[in-house]
Image (cartoon, rainbow, N blue to C red):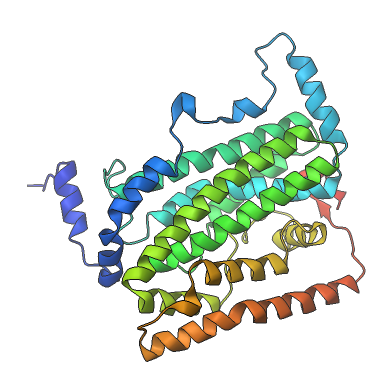
Amino acid sequence: KYAVFDDKALTDRLTKTAYLYPKHVEVIEDFEPLVDSMVDNILLETGEKAWQPQDYLPDLSQDDWLEQTKELRGMAAEVPDDVFVVLVGDMITEEALPTYQTLLNTFEGCDDPIGTTDSAWARWSRGWTSEENRHGDLLNKYLYLTGKTDMRAIEVTIQHLITSGFNPGARKDPYRGFVYTSFQERATKISHGNVGKLAKDYGAKDLQRISAKIAGDEGRHEKAYQSFCTEILKRDPDGLLMEFGDMMRGQIVMPAELMTDGNDPHLYENFSAVAQRLGVYTALDYADIIEHLVNHWKIGELTGLSSEGEKEQEYICRLPKRYRKLAERSMNKKKDVEVEPQAFSWIFDRKA
Protein backbone atom coordinates (compact mmCIF):
# COMPACT_ATOMS: atom_id res chain seq x y z
CA LYS A 1 0.00 0.00 0.00
CA TYR A 2 1.32 3.44 -0.94
CA ALA A 3 1.64 6.26 1.60
CA VAL A 4 -0.62 9.20 0.72
CA PHE A 5 -0.05 12.74 1.99
CA ASP A 6 -2.27 15.76 1.65
CA ASP A 7 -0.53 19.15 1.25
CA LYS A 8 -0.34 19.87 5.00
CA ALA A 9 0.95 16.40 5.88
CA LEU A 10 3.57 16.61 3.13
CA THR A 11 4.71 20.05 4.29
CA ASP A 12 4.97 18.80 7.91
CA ARG A 13 6.92 15.75 6.81
CA LEU A 14 9.37 17.82 4.77
CA THR A 15 9.72 20.33 7.61
CA LYS A 16 10.92 17.53 9.89
CA THR A 17 13.63 16.47 7.46
CA ALA A 18 17.08 16.82 9.04
CA TYR A 19 18.74 20.15 8.19
CA LEU A 20 22.40 20.68 7.40
CA TYR A 21 22.20 24.02 9.25
CA PRO A 22 19.64 23.59 12.07
CA LYS A 23 20.81 26.67 13.99
CA HIS A 24 20.64 28.84 10.87
CA VAL A 25 17.11 27.61 10.17
CA GLU A 26 16.11 28.36 13.76
CA VAL A 27 17.42 31.91 13.42
CA ILE A 28 15.62 32.70 10.17
CA GLU A 29 12.39 31.20 11.51
CA ASP A 30 12.69 33.60 14.46
CA PHE A 31 12.28 36.67 12.24
CA GLU A 32 9.68 35.24 9.87
CA PRO A 33 7.17 37.94 11.00
CA LEU A 34 9.55 40.55 9.53
CA VAL A 35 9.54 38.65 6.23
CA ASP A 36 5.75 38.70 6.35
CA SER A 37 5.86 42.50 6.46
CA MET A 38 8.44 42.54 3.66
CA VAL A 39 5.99 40.75 1.39
CA ASP A 40 3.46 43.51 2.05
CA ASN A 41 5.75 46.55 2.21
CA ILE A 42 8.71 45.81 -0.10
CA LEU A 43 7.02 43.81 -2.84
CA LEU A 44 4.48 45.64 -4.95
CA GLU A 45 0.94 44.41 -5.31
CA THR A 46 0.34 42.20 -8.29
CA GLY A 47 -2.19 42.84 -11.03
CA GLU A 48 -3.46 46.29 -11.98
CA LYS A 49 -1.50 48.17 -9.32
CA ALA A 50 1.88 46.79 -10.43
CA TRP A 51 3.85 48.08 -13.39
CA GLN A 52 4.05 45.73 -16.36
CA PRO A 53 6.41 45.57 -19.36
CA GLN A 54 3.67 46.80 -21.72
CA ASP A 55 3.60 50.12 -19.85
CA TYR A 56 7.01 50.95 -21.36
CA LEU A 57 6.59 49.63 -24.91
CA PRO A 58 4.71 50.61 -28.08
CA ASP A 59 1.10 49.43 -27.97
CA LEU A 60 0.62 47.42 -31.17
CA SER A 61 -3.16 47.43 -30.68
CA GLN A 62 -3.35 51.18 -31.26
CA ASP A 63 -3.81 52.94 -34.60
CA ASP A 64 -0.50 54.78 -34.19
CA TRP A 65 1.48 51.61 -33.36
CA LEU A 66 3.76 52.14 -36.34
CA GLU A 67 4.65 55.69 -35.31
CA GLN A 68 5.33 54.49 -31.75
CA THR A 69 7.58 51.73 -33.02
CA LYS A 70 9.42 54.02 -35.43
CA GLU A 71 10.10 56.44 -32.58
CA LEU A 72 11.57 53.61 -30.45
CA ARG A 73 13.71 52.39 -33.35
CA GLY A 74 14.87 55.92 -34.16
CA MET A 75 16.14 56.47 -30.62
CA ALA A 76 17.73 53.00 -30.50
CA ALA A 77 19.57 53.70 -33.75
CA GLU A 78 21.59 56.40 -31.95
CA VAL A 79 22.78 53.98 -29.24
CA PRO A 80 26.15 52.38 -30.18
CA ASP A 81 26.74 48.64 -30.39
CA ASP A 82 28.88 48.40 -27.26
CA VAL A 83 25.98 49.72 -25.15
CA PHE A 84 23.70 47.17 -26.82
CA VAL A 85 26.14 44.36 -26.00
CA VAL A 86 25.95 45.25 -22.30
CA LEU A 87 22.18 45.63 -22.48
CA VAL A 88 21.86 42.19 -24.09
CA GLY A 89 24.15 40.63 -21.47
CA ASP A 90 22.05 42.17 -18.70
CA MET A 91 18.84 40.94 -20.35
CA ILE A 92 20.20 37.39 -20.70
CA THR A 93 21.12 37.46 -17.01
CA GLU A 94 17.54 38.48 -16.15
CA GLU A 95 16.05 35.80 -18.41
CA ALA A 96 17.82 33.05 -16.44
CA LEU A 97 15.31 33.68 -13.64
CA PRO A 98 14.27 29.99 -13.35
CA THR A 99 17.79 29.25 -12.13
CA TYR A 100 17.55 31.90 -9.42
CA GLN A 101 14.19 30.71 -8.09
CA THR A 102 15.62 27.19 -8.02
CA LEU A 103 18.52 28.56 -5.97
CA LEU A 104 16.20 30.33 -3.49
CA ASN A 105 14.38 27.06 -2.94
CA THR A 106 17.63 25.38 -1.89
CA PHE A 107 18.10 27.70 1.12
CA GLU A 108 17.13 25.62 4.13
CA GLY A 109 14.09 26.96 5.95
CA CYS A 110 13.22 29.31 3.05
CA ASP A 111 11.99 26.78 0.56
CA ASP A 112 8.55 26.19 -0.95
CA PRO A 113 8.24 22.40 -0.77
CA ILE A 114 4.81 22.05 -2.40
CA GLY A 115 4.77 25.12 -4.67
CA THR A 116 1.96 26.90 -2.80
CA THR A 117 3.36 26.83 0.75
CA ASP A 118 1.82 29.62 2.81
CA SER A 119 4.92 30.47 4.87
CA ALA A 120 6.28 34.03 4.72
CA TRP A 121 9.52 32.76 3.16
CA ALA A 122 7.71 30.86 0.38
CA ARG A 123 5.48 33.85 -0.37
CA TRP A 124 8.55 36.10 -0.48
CA SER A 125 10.25 33.74 -2.93
CA ARG A 126 7.26 33.61 -5.27
CA GLY A 127 6.61 37.36 -4.99
CA TRP A 128 10.24 38.23 -5.65
CA THR A 129 10.23 35.94 -8.69
CA SER A 130 7.04 37.47 -10.08
CA GLU A 131 8.56 40.95 -9.88
CA GLU A 132 11.90 39.92 -11.35
CA ASN A 133 10.10 38.13 -14.19
CA ARG A 134 9.08 41.51 -15.63
CA HIS A 135 12.69 42.57 -16.20
CA GLY A 136 13.62 39.96 -18.78
CA ASP A 137 10.21 40.25 -20.46
CA LEU A 138 10.56 44.00 -20.88
CA LEU A 139 14.17 44.00 -22.11
CA ASN A 140 13.51 41.08 -24.47
CA LYS A 141 10.61 42.86 -26.16
CA TYR A 142 12.50 46.15 -26.31
CA LEU A 143 15.49 44.51 -28.01
CA TYR A 144 13.19 42.72 -30.48
CA LEU A 145 11.49 45.98 -31.48
CA THR A 146 14.78 47.84 -32.03
CA GLY A 147 15.76 45.48 -34.86
CA LYS A 148 19.41 45.94 -33.89
CA THR A 149 20.02 42.52 -32.36
CA ASP A 150 20.02 38.90 -33.51
CA MET A 151 17.23 37.61 -31.31
CA ARG A 152 17.82 33.98 -32.23
CA ALA A 153 21.47 34.16 -31.12
CA ILE A 154 20.29 35.80 -27.90
CA GLU A 155 17.65 33.10 -27.34
CA VAL A 156 20.26 30.40 -27.89
CA THR A 157 22.44 32.07 -25.23
CA ILE A 158 19.53 32.21 -22.76
CA GLN A 159 18.75 28.53 -23.27
CA HIS A 160 22.40 27.57 -22.80
CA LEU A 161 22.64 29.65 -19.62
CA ILE A 162 19.54 28.15 -18.01
CA THR A 163 20.72 24.67 -18.99
CA SER A 164 24.18 25.30 -17.52
CA GLY A 165 22.87 26.83 -14.27
CA PHE A 166 25.26 28.42 -11.81
CA ASN A 167 26.68 27.74 -8.38
CA PRO A 168 27.15 30.79 -6.14
CA GLY A 169 28.56 28.68 -3.31
CA ALA A 170 25.51 29.04 -1.06
CA ARG A 171 25.65 25.33 -0.11
CA LYS A 172 21.93 25.36 0.87
CA ASP A 173 22.80 27.71 3.75
CA PRO A 174 20.37 30.63 4.13
CA TYR A 175 23.11 32.79 5.69
CA ARG A 176 25.34 32.40 2.64
CA GLY A 177 22.38 32.73 0.33
CA PHE A 178 21.33 36.08 1.76
CA VAL A 179 24.89 37.44 1.76
CA TYR A 180 25.04 36.51 -1.93
CA THR A 181 21.68 38.05 -2.84
CA SER A 182 22.52 41.21 -0.84
CA PHE A 183 25.61 41.61 -3.01
CA GLN A 184 24.06 40.56 -6.31
CA GLU A 185 20.93 42.70 -6.16
CA ARG A 186 23.10 45.77 -5.59
CA ALA A 187 25.39 44.80 -8.48
CA THR A 188 22.40 44.41 -10.79
CA LYS A 189 20.96 47.75 -9.66
CA ILE A 190 24.27 49.45 -10.48
CA SER A 191 24.50 47.82 -13.90
CA HIS A 192 20.95 48.70 -15.00
CA GLY A 193 21.30 52.20 -13.58
CA ASN A 194 24.49 52.84 -15.55
CA VAL A 195 22.96 51.52 -18.78
CA GLY A 196 20.15 54.02 -18.19
CA LYS A 197 22.67 56.87 -17.87
CA LEU A 198 24.31 55.85 -21.15
CA ALA A 199 20.89 55.67 -22.83
CA LYS A 200 20.21 59.23 -21.67
CA ASP A 201 23.54 60.38 -23.12
CA TYR A 202 22.49 59.04 -26.53
CA GLY A 203 18.95 60.42 -26.38
CA ALA A 204 17.17 57.06 -25.91
CA LYS A 205 14.58 58.28 -23.41
CA ASP A 206 12.57 55.07 -23.52
CA LEU A 207 15.58 52.88 -22.69
CA GLN A 208 16.52 55.32 -19.93
CA ARG A 209 13.05 54.90 -18.36
CA ILE A 210 13.15 51.11 -18.74
CA SER A 211 16.57 50.83 -17.12
CA ALA A 212 15.62 53.15 -14.26
CA LYS A 213 12.45 51.16 -13.55
CA ILE A 214 14.31 47.85 -13.41
CA ALA A 215 17.09 49.38 -11.27
CA GLY A 216 14.39 50.59 -8.86
CA ASP A 217 13.07 47.04 -8.43
CA GLU A 218 16.58 45.75 -7.79
CA GLY A 219 17.10 48.48 -5.20
CA ARG A 220 14.00 47.44 -3.25
CA HIS A 221 14.98 43.79 -3.37
CA GLU A 222 18.51 44.67 -2.28
CA LYS A 223 17.12 46.41 0.83
CA ALA A 224 15.05 43.34 1.69
CA TYR A 225 17.94 40.87 1.48
CA GLN A 226 20.24 43.19 3.39
CA SER A 227 17.54 43.51 6.08
CA PHE A 228 17.44 39.71 6.38
CA CYS A 229 21.19 39.72 7.08
CA THR A 230 20.77 42.53 9.62
CA GLU A 231 18.26 40.37 11.50
CA ILE A 232 20.63 37.39 11.40
CA LEU A 233 23.42 39.55 12.85
CA LYS A 234 21.16 40.52 15.77
CA ARG A 235 20.68 36.85 16.63
CA ASP A 236 23.84 35.07 15.46
CA PRO A 237 26.62 37.53 14.57
CA ASP A 238 29.36 34.89 14.82
CA GLY A 239 27.50 32.60 12.44
CA LEU A 240 26.98 35.21 9.73
CA LEU A 241 30.53 36.57 10.00
CA MET A 242 31.99 33.09 9.54
CA GLU A 243 30.01 32.59 6.33
CA PHE A 244 30.55 36.12 5.03
CA GLY A 245 34.31 35.85 5.55
CA ASP A 246 34.46 32.43 3.94
CA MET A 247 32.59 33.66 0.86
CA MET A 248 34.88 36.67 0.53
CA ARG A 249 37.96 34.43 0.49
CA GLY A 250 36.69 33.24 -2.86
CA GLN A 251 35.03 35.44 -5.45
CA ILE A 252 31.36 36.37 -5.68
CA VAL A 253 30.20 34.40 -8.72
CA MET A 254 28.28 36.42 -11.28
CA PRO A 255 25.02 34.69 -12.30
CA ALA A 256 25.79 34.72 -16.04
CA GLU A 257 29.35 33.43 -15.75
CA LEU A 258 28.51 30.25 -17.70
CA MET A 259 26.86 32.05 -20.61
CA THR A 260 27.68 30.84 -24.11
CA ASP A 261 26.17 31.27 -27.55
CA GLY A 262 27.63 27.95 -28.67
CA ASN A 263 30.39 29.69 -30.64
CA ASP A 264 32.41 32.06 -28.47
CA PRO A 265 34.05 30.16 -25.57
CA HIS A 266 34.95 33.51 -23.95
CA LEU A 267 31.57 35.19 -24.33
CA TYR A 268 31.17 36.14 -20.67
CA GLU A 269 34.71 37.54 -20.45
CA ASN A 270 34.18 39.56 -23.63
CA PHE A 271 30.82 40.89 -22.43
CA SER A 272 32.35 41.79 -19.03
CA ALA A 273 35.24 43.58 -20.73
CA VAL A 274 32.80 45.80 -22.65
CA ALA A 275 30.86 46.52 -19.44
CA GLN A 276 34.11 47.44 -17.69
CA ARG A 277 35.25 49.76 -20.49
CA LEU A 278 31.90 51.57 -20.52
CA GLY A 279 31.89 51.89 -16.72
CA VAL A 280 28.62 49.93 -16.47
CA TYR A 281 30.01 47.45 -13.96
CA THR A 282 33.67 47.55 -12.95
CA ALA A 283 36.09 46.10 -10.44
CA LEU A 284 35.68 49.32 -8.47
CA ASP A 285 31.94 48.67 -8.23
CA TYR A 286 32.77 45.25 -6.76
CA ALA A 287 34.91 46.94 -4.09
CA ASP A 288 32.23 49.58 -3.46
CA ILE A 289 29.57 46.91 -2.87
CA ILE A 290 31.73 45.16 -0.28
CA GLU A 291 32.35 48.50 1.45
CA HIS A 292 28.62 49.26 1.40
CA LEU A 293 27.76 45.90 3.00
CA VAL A 294 30.45 46.27 5.69
CA ASN A 295 29.16 49.76 6.55
CA HIS A 296 25.44 48.95 6.22
CA TRP A 297 25.72 45.96 8.55
CA LYS A 298 28.08 47.90 10.86
CA ILE A 299 30.46 44.95 10.90
CA GLY A 300 33.16 46.93 12.68
CA GLU A 301 30.81 47.82 15.57
CA LEU A 302 29.73 44.28 16.44
CA THR A 303 30.53 43.23 20.02
CA GLY A 304 30.29 40.06 22.10
CA LEU A 305 31.90 37.95 19.39
CA SER A 306 33.85 34.74 19.89
CA SER A 307 37.59 34.79 19.16
CA GLU A 308 36.88 33.22 15.74
CA GLY A 309 34.20 35.84 15.10
CA GLU A 310 36.58 38.67 15.99
CA LYS A 311 39.15 37.31 13.51
CA GLU A 312 36.51 37.27 10.77
CA GLN A 313 35.36 40.75 11.75
CA GLU A 314 38.91 42.08 11.39
CA TYR A 315 39.37 40.27 8.05
CA ILE A 316 36.07 41.53 6.61
CA CYS A 317 36.68 45.14 7.69
CA ARG A 318 40.00 45.16 5.82
CA LEU A 319 38.42 43.91 2.58
CA PRO A 320 37.09 47.18 1.07
CA LYS A 321 40.50 48.87 1.14
CA ARG A 322 42.21 45.74 -0.18
CA TYR A 323 39.74 45.26 -3.04
CA ARG A 324 39.88 48.93 -3.98
CA LYS A 325 43.66 48.76 -4.34
CA LEU A 326 43.39 45.60 -6.43
CA ALA A 327 40.67 47.16 -8.60
CA GLU A 328 42.65 50.36 -9.22
CA ARG A 329 45.77 48.36 -10.08
CA SER A 330 43.82 46.12 -12.46
CA MET A 331 42.05 49.01 -14.18
CA ASN A 332 45.28 50.98 -14.57
CA LYS A 333 46.92 47.98 -16.23
CA LYS A 334 44.03 47.64 -18.67
CA LYS A 335 44.37 51.30 -19.67
CA ASP A 336 47.78 50.51 -21.13
CA VAL A 337 46.50 47.54 -23.13
CA GLU A 338 45.21 48.20 -26.63
CA VAL A 339 41.60 47.06 -26.82
CA GLU A 340 40.84 44.57 -29.56
CA PRO A 341 37.14 44.68 -30.49
CA GLN A 342 35.37 41.30 -30.38
CA ALA A 343 32.59 40.01 -32.62
CA PHE A 344 29.29 39.29 -30.85
CA SER A 345 26.67 37.02 -32.38
CA TRP A 346 24.05 39.07 -30.47
CA ILE A 347 24.64 42.00 -32.86
CA PHE A 348 25.04 39.95 -36.06
CA ASP A 349 28.78 39.44 -35.48
CA ARG A 350 29.52 43.15 -35.51
CA LYS A 351 32.46 44.03 -33.27
CA ALA A 352 32.33 45.90 -29.98
Q: Is residue 145 left or right of residue 161?
A: right
Residue 278 in sight: yes
Residue farthest to the bottom? 307
Q: Residue at x 40, y 89 (%)?
A: 308
Q: Position of residue 72 (x, y in %)?
A: 78, 27
Q: Is residue 201 above or below residue 273?
A: above
Q: Position of residue 54 (x, y in %)?
A: 61, 26
Q: Residue at x 44, y 50 (%)?
A: 101
Q: Is residue 15 left or right of residue 328?
A: left
Q: Quadrant of residue 232?
A: bottom left
Q: Residue at x 43, y 68 (%)?
A: 176
Q: Is residue 154 above or below residue 73?
A: below
Q: Position of residue 322 (x, y in %)?
A: 66, 82
Residue farthest to the left? 1
Q: Is residue 68 left or right of residue 221?
A: right
Tell how many labels: 0
Q: Residue at x 81, y 24 (%)?
A: 71
Residue 171 in sight: no
Q: Position of residue 43 (x, y in %)?
A: 44, 41
